[in-house]
Image: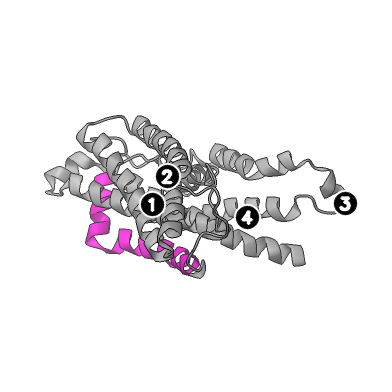
Amino acid sequence: MADVLLILGKALELSTPLILAALGGLYSERAGVMNIALEGKMLASACAVALISVASGNPLIGLLVGVLAATLLSLLHYMLTQKFRIDHVVSGMAINVLAIGGCRFAYAQFTDKNRSGEIPHLPEAAYWALAAVMPFAVALYLRQTRPGLRLLAVGNDPDKSREAGINVARVRLQSLAICGLLCGLAGALIVTKTANYSDDMTAGKGFIALAALVVGGWRPLPTLAACLFFALCEAIQQVLQGGKGWLSAIPPQYWNTLPYIATIFALAFLGGKFRVPSGMGKP
């Protein structure tokens, strides 16, 4: 019983960055901009938070710079896809590669090798509260407000939206800025949880968040449920790995693959059941 409660508690904790990043992806893709760059934006935020929090000694300044870093990458994604009409997948991959290489270089160059102690960080509770409220707020925003309905209209049919007088470019710019903000918060939380930074520390969470968005059918509340499921798989892996009895016979490498296997199965069985926003990827 204790293990069950521990797994459930850890699943709620682990779901927080997934929820924030998936909602960021939802804003982007419901506006018609395919976004596989969630991972890079989260990583850029995590690196910036780690560097600036230590340099300034102020975790709030670190958080603001982290969110800014992710938002700038999001605006770069907007420029590449909407101004220069580069394929959205190519643009997303380029941003991921840029973030991985840039973070390795920046952290190696600007980190004191003799530094010890934790990175200053804000309490996790603020992130938990935000992740608990955001899916419901986004659901209301999309269905009950004029800007939300415009966003859905742009994502479904950008040409008709233009004919109706909607500024498609502005809607997509705003959506990508919000995507950067949410991915920045998700990356900052990952650093907050460990109070440390390492290369590639997002460990594919951006891709899992994207998978949750697809499995959730690009809808806020089903996406929340998908994030909780993937987090539950990771919690099972963390709590039961190396356990007693027959559990101890399972090599740790197999446990580590559990969240990724669950993601593949979820995409295989549910990913094709929902209609992709029809305007996604269109100019």
Residue 219 visible in the shown view: no
Mark 4 near mark 1, Cβ–Cβ under 8 Å? Answer: no
Q: Position of residue 232 (x, y in %)?
A: 63, 55
Residue 76 vertical position relative to residue 146 in the rendered view, above or below: above
Residue 245's disc is: 3
Q: Nearer the viewer, mark 3 or mark 4?
A: 3
Mark 1 near mark 2, Cβ–Cβ under 8 Å? Answer: yes
Residue 38's disc is: 2
Instruction: Please state, as top left, top right, bottom left or bottom right, where the N terminus lies in the image.
Output: bottom right
User: Disc 2 versus disc 3: distance between alpha carbons?
Assistant: 39 Å
Secondary element at tag 1: helix
Q: Position of residue 186 (x, y in %)?
A: 45, 55
**Frontmost residue, 85 versus 211:** 85
The amino acid type, in three-letter code, at marker 4 is Leu
Secondary element at tag 3: helix
Is 107 on the left or on the right of 26, as rendered? right
Provide the residue designation for mark 4: 232
Q: Position of residue 140 (x, y in %)?
A: 34, 64
Residue 24's disc is: 1
